[in-house]
Amino acid sequence: MSTEPLLSMRDLRVGFVSEAGLVQAVDGVSFDLAAGEVLAIVGESGAGKSVTAQTIVGLTRSANTRIEGSVRLRGAELVGASDDELGKVRGAEVGMVFQDPMTSFNPVYRLGAQIVEAIRAHRDDVSKREGHERAIELLDSVGIPNASRRVDDYPHEFSGGMRQRAMIAMALALDPDVLIADEPTTALDVTVQAQILALLERLNQERGLATILITHDLGVVAEVADRVLVMYAGRVVEQGTLEEIFYDPQHPYTWGLLGSLTRIDRPRPERLPQIGGAPPSLLNLPQGCSFRPRCPHEFDRCAELPGLDQRLADAPGHCDRCWLDPERKRALRVVDDQIGLESPA
Amino acid sequence: MTADGTQSRDMDNFQAHRREVLLEVTDLVKHFSGKRGALFNREDDRVRAVDGVSFAVRLGETLGLVGESGCGKSTLCRAALQLTKPTSGSVRFEGREIAGLSRRAMRPLRSEMQMVFQDPYASLNPRKRIGQIIGYPLKLQGTASDGELRRRVQELLERVGLSPEHYDRYPHEFSGGQRQRIGIARALAVNPKLIVADEPVSALDVSIRAQIVNLLADLQEELGLTYVFVAHDIGVVRHVSDRIAVMHEGRIVEEGPADQVCERPADAYTKKLLAAVPIPDPREARARRQTIGSA
């Protein structure tokens, strides 16, 4: 593992021009990703997690998108790169897996043919026959039984879980260094989800693949992530290691997310702790902290936007956007002996 | 494992057993013919979506129905409510047999049993105002005047945590969580006794999910509602349910008090389902992976 990060994002800002004004979907996201590492980006719909990941490979580029900041892959800048240059990165160096494997494959082509096409788009020295052999190997490596027969099936002949495996196989076809997995298990049943998560973990260990895992499910995060970014309304509100986020969370929104989980390994509470209200519209963000209108601990200073800063002396890299005193937080975040957000008054 | 909470819940369950049965389903079967053409339609081609299911729901309780996609849970709900005709079996509502009743005969019973659907985007007509959507079931009954109707709808809006001013708005003006509240208000409009909620929170964001779960709990307490709560997420099902039925391949493989099914599962499939649920706690998740790995 080299000291230079594989992927490095600095102050990424992505805005979409709409009739109602500029929608700042991503507002200043920074992180480093090393080989073999799993970074989870957590948040609700509209938090900006998918836009952040898609912008890495230029999928958000359009006439109405305003992209600022820097994304470097092994030192090479991607934000200002030409479409051709990005085309070479996409698929070859950065693989992608999306939530819905049914809409990610073309229904009228055989699965194997689509994998061959993905390979040959980047490697014109690979013959169709070689590509076909490679597709079989890939399908086999992600645990698809009878890969040599199933390679000629159509997407609809695969179950949801098998289709997601095939999607991962295709994402790995060119042996990328980085995998972006956007809600890869959300559409799957839990028993299948567990298999896919185990597969992703195995690929991480065997290939040293760096993974950006986008999810709204903290249970999935706890199973696979090394580090976590919590996003809210386009900004990172907290970031840290897996342990820091789960056992010493600093931002009230993180407390709320952790508190509202249903846990089958604990006695159930009388009432499920909830976060009041709803996320703000990106067109009309509250002044200062975006979580302020939903936060029971809000006070005067919250009208000023807190920076994403390290606030604990002994935890470098653990940063949050909250003005509350860290010592007070440790008392405030305990609700019924668990980490949670106090119910709104 | 048996904390005090579990004890009192088991007592609650004991009490519940003495309550009156509202919905009783016995040996319910719903098969779909696999291939077209009557001549070659052999028994084997049939899809046994619901394959001999029995359960009872008592007044005021919540039965959780949990299972993975394709296990037949939605078909079971539809067949129980006579939204699709069961192949065979019995469904009794308040003691009265309703399986095979004509649409006409079912009509007066419809207001007693309502559904809440998964997708709050697909289940509301985008061209209708919220007031019309919620008021429509009442209008069908034809008993209320226009003024009464409006008052009743506004009362319902407040009851589900929306504002009476939302009456003239359209569905697209609302978020997913608010739309689910509208769907709940529509179900409540006709004063039903039974609500069948099919994956009511699975399309919602985490912070909103708890709001809707708590709203359903409050409404149950205030109005004495009986729920069948269908979901694939056993964590949510356990939280809301008095009893849980686990469905697999068209059959109920295990049924019992919610905590018992989750803490001391008897059936192999239930165990497999529980073992697959991610634990949102890194240390415990790691410990569990190691025990499963070494087993």
Image (cartoon, rainbow, N blue to C red):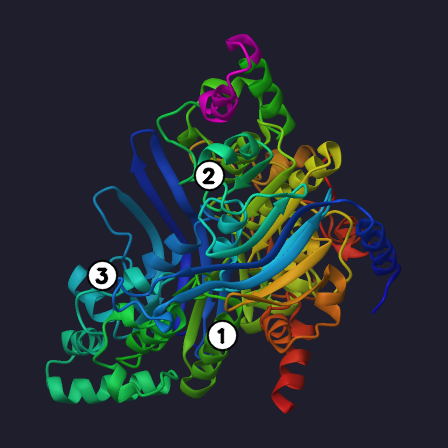
Q: Which of B80 and A290 is in front in this view?
A: B80
Residue occupied by mark 3: A81
Quadrant occupied by the C terminus of chain B:
bottom right
Residue occupied by mark 2: B102
What is the crowding at mark 3: few (fewer than 14 residues within 10 Å), some, or many (at least 20)?
A: few
Question: Percent from the top left, x then y, of residue A345?
Answer: 74, 33
- Are tags 3 and 1 found on a single chain? yes
Mark nearer the viewer, 3 or 1: 1
Left or right: A181 in relation to A227: left
Chain letter behind tag 3: A
Question: Percent from the top left, x then y, of residue A273?
Answer: 70, 47
Mark nearer the viewer, 2 or 3: 2
The answer to whether the residues at label 2 and label 3 have Cβ atoms under 8 Å apart is: no
Q: Which of A189 and A68 is in front in this view?
A: A189
**Span highlighted in magenta in the image:** B130-148
Q: Nearer the viewer, residue A230 or A163?
A: A163
| Residue type pointed to by label 2 | Ser
Q: Is residue A44 visible?
A: no
Mark nearer the viewer, 2 or 1: 2
Q: Which mark sits nearer the N-terminus, 3 or 1?
A: 3
Rounded to the nearest angstrom, the CA distance separating label 2 from label 3 is: 66 Å
| Residue type pointed to by label 3 | Ala
| Residue type pointed to by label 1 | Leu
The disc at residue B28 is: none
The answer to whether the residues at label 2 and label 1 have Cβ atoms under 8 Å apart is: no
